[in-house]
Amino acid sequence: MTFARIAIIGLGLQGGSIGLAVREYLPEARTTGYDLSPQHRALAAARGLVDTVCETAADAVREADLVIFCVPPGAMGMAAEQVREALPAGALVSDVGSSKEAIAKALGEALPDHTVIPAHPVAGTENSGPDAGFAHLFRNRWCIVTPPAKVDMVMLSQLVGFWEALGANVEIMTPGHHDLVLAVTSHLPHLIAYTIVGTASDLEDVTQGEVIKYSAGGFRDFTRIAASDPTMWRDVFLSNKEAVLTMLQRFTEDLTALQRAIRVGDGDKLFDQFARTRAIRRSIIEEGQDDARADFGRGDHEGVSAGKL
Ligand SMILES: NC(=O)c1ccc[n+]([C@@H]2O[C@H](COP(=O)([O-])OP(=O)(O)OC[C@H]3O[C@@H](n4cnc5c(N)ncnc54)[C@H](O)[C@@H]3O)[C@@H](O)[C@H]2O)c1
Ligand SMILES: O=C(O)C(=O)C[C@]1(C(=O)O)C=C[C@@H](O)C=C1
């Protein structure tokens, strides 16, 4: 049994992709949506991201049996409060936020009488807004579901089935474990990209504009990541502060060790490290975890830029 009426709050990359994916993979389900921005509501309606774009969040959820919050992490609590009075008693509440402990708390506090099962599709691009979504975003990608310790098992299996129907591979973990893992695999890489692109730009006086001119290689990959939405990523770092700081400390130590190896001319240390990381990349490709986006979604949507790199 899957959901019949799905309300999507926030019609950007994630919300829009869910709306389009539901139409493609769960055609029986009806979708409603709401976005705080009137321009985004108009764009969402023009693209047909959901069956009905509503003028209020309350109208969007009034008949829903599943509501998914797809707003920036820092807006989850406020968005949930906006639907409190209108949300049917038996509706399941979920989200797609990139951090989980803080968001689970915010949703639970805003909607204390509802079942809240947070989730995080580990699938995205650097693009945002209603033009960025595409139906295949979740195909062959992980979706991490982080249920509370005491959870309604029927609702949990319905939510798992929902994400599987959209093409995702579902993994269940605690919110705390999710936040630690994603701090190193997603949040820290973004922080590094934001830093290196900012540093290079600050050095343009010294490099006489050559950073941009010669940014065809590794640096260009960093600029893609560093083009990601500033609001979302500000909120990710603020909402996953402890885990990110823990991983950043460890990363800084490892970076300092490489810095020392360069200074003292320890080529073996550098070679060993680079050989180890090359093997990791190769094992990821062998396991088929490499950018499935080349096959699914990103390559076939002109609004996304993987093919442009
Ligand atoms: N971008 C990614 O790669 C990615 C991947 C996985 C998960 N996420 C998570 O998904 C969520 C949404 O990210 P996105 O990439 O779709 O962002 P987005 O900027 O494309 O879309 C967010 C939308 O929410 C709207 N919004 C903001 N506050 C609102 C409110 N109170 N009520 C209703 N609408 C509101 C904005 O107008 C915008 O249209 C975030 O929590 C993010 O952490 C993002
Ligand atoms: O490929 C990208 O553009 C992404 O950054 C996607 C990415 C990631 O780090 O993997 C970004 C944030 C998410 O919460 C999930 C996915």
Image: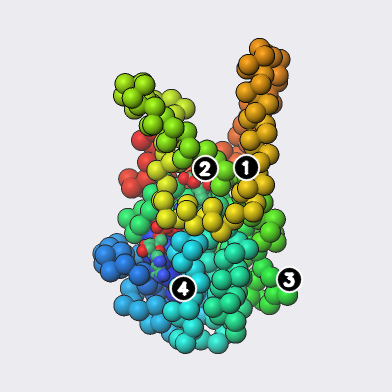
Q: Which mark is residue 78?
A: 4
Q: Nearer the viewer, residue 37 or 164?
A: 37
**Three-letter residue code for mark 2:** Leu
| Rendered residue at 31%/77% (across/down) | 55
Instruction: Look at the numbered disc 4 and say if its residue's Cβ is closer than 8 Å to ligand 1.
Output: yes
Q: Which residue is mark 3?
A: 149
N-term-proximal mark, 1 vs 2: 2
Q: Which residue is mark 2?
A: 191
**Residue 56 picture quarter:** bottom left
- Is 259 on the left or on the right of 205, as rendered? right
Task: Give the mark toward the camera: 3 or 2.
Answer: 2
N-term-proximal mark, 1 vs 4: 4
Residue 16 visible to the viewer: no
Residue 65 visible to the viewer: yes
Badge 1 crowding class, 10 Å Cα cut-off, few under 14, some 14 to 19, many 20 or more, is some
Badge 2 crowding class, 10 Å Cα cut-off, few under 14, some 14 to 19, many 20 or more, is some
In three-dimensional space, the C-alpha distance between marks 3 and 1, rounded to whole angstroms, equals: 29 Å
| Rendered residue at 34%/59% (across/down) | 130
- Is 20 on the left or on the right of 4, as rendered? left
N-term-proximal mark, 3 vs 1: 3
x and y, in percent, of residue 293 in the image? 48, 44
In contact (CB < 8 Å): disc 3 and disc 1: no
In this picture, is 123 found above or below 42?
above
N-term-proximal mark, 3 vs 2: 3
